[in-house]
Amino acid sequence: MTTPPNDLPAPVALLTGAGTGIGREAAQELSSRGWRLLLAGRREAPLLETGGMLSGPWHAVPTDVRSAEQCQAAVDAAARHFGRLDALINNAGFAPSQPVPKHTPDLIDEVFAINAQGPAYLMTAAWRLFERQNAEDHAKGLEPRGGRIVNISSMASVDPFPGLFAYAGAKAALNLLTRAAHREGADLGIRCFALAPGAVETAMLRTILDTDILPPSRTLPPRAIAVVIADCLEGKHDEHAGEVILLPSP
């Protein structure tokens, strides 16, 4: 989506995992570009900290993406608080590292719930709002804005290392959700992207690998991913819409 003309309100994005890491950097990048933001995450305090760093309008929506009801409520909050929703960024993630036989049913359920099912809940909820907005724009004689979805996948979805059995599978599912949604949304002006970063210097990474094994010099800064997210929302990577965009670490 390109920046709207001056007579239209600034676009609105719903961003999950907004309290830390890539999410916090993405919030700052988008805010600096004039986006209004719904900050979603399980813990309210980090969301409020992120909001305090932003230069533009924002609203915190504590959300557990494992809950379809809370995902719908987050989308509803965008319409209620800002009047519309133009983009969804599924950034929340959970990446436990365990050998295959130590992946319990509960752990597998949680990994898929956060990394694949939650994004699917949010995509379907946002999609319904995109369609309604587009119909309203068309009825007013305006050019429909469509919608944008950016899903944060992982290089593990195409090249997993030991310990990421369920996580790699869940992110691979997210890749296919992205492809399927993009094909269905093309005629509606809904563009979908999957970004698959390598190792990113975040607190979640350091629960898996310490700096002795993977030094910071071999990781990506979260802001590097944030810039690509913002560029996808603003139409700068439309030639890769529907694809998995690989962002390998050094």
Image: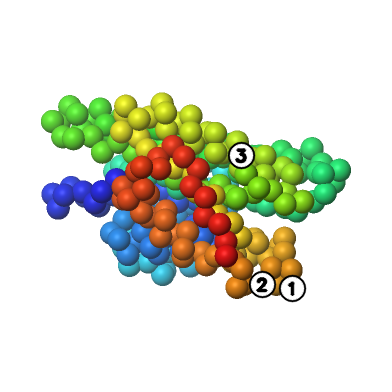
Which three-letter amino acid code belongs to the residue tagged 1?
Asp
How far is the residue under mark 1 from the one under mark 3? 28 Å
Mark 2: secondary structure: loop
Q: Answer whether labels 1 and 3 touch (C-beta < 8 Å).
A: no
Which three-letter amino acid code belongs to the residue tagged 3?
Ala
Which residue carries the number 2 mark? 215
Q: Position of residue 12 (x, y in %)?
A: 33, 49
Q: Position of residue 82 (x, y in %)?
A: 31, 48
Q: Give the residue at x 77% y 40%.
A: 106
Which residue carries the number 3 mark? 172
In this rendering, the answer to whether 138 lies above or below 36 is above
Q: Position of residue 74 (x, y in %)?
A: 45, 43
How far is the residue under mark 3 from the one under mark 2? 26 Å
How far is the residue under mark 1 from the one under mark 2? 6 Å
* Residue 210 makes an appearance in the image: no
- Kindly identify which numbered label has been placed on residue 212: 1
Dot 1 or dot 3: first in sequence order is: 3
Q: Give the residue at x 71% y 38%.
A: 109
Outermost residue to the front: 250
Mark 1: secondary structure: loop
In this rendering, the answer to whether 146 lies above or below 98 is above
Image check: 215 left or right of 46? right
Q: Answer whether labels 3 and 2 touch (C-beta < 8 Å).
A: no
* Residue 93 makes an appearance in the image: yes
Q: Residues within 10 Å of mark 2 (few under 14, many from 20)?
A: few
Where's the C terminus, which quadrant?
bottom right
Image check: 115 left or right of 90? right
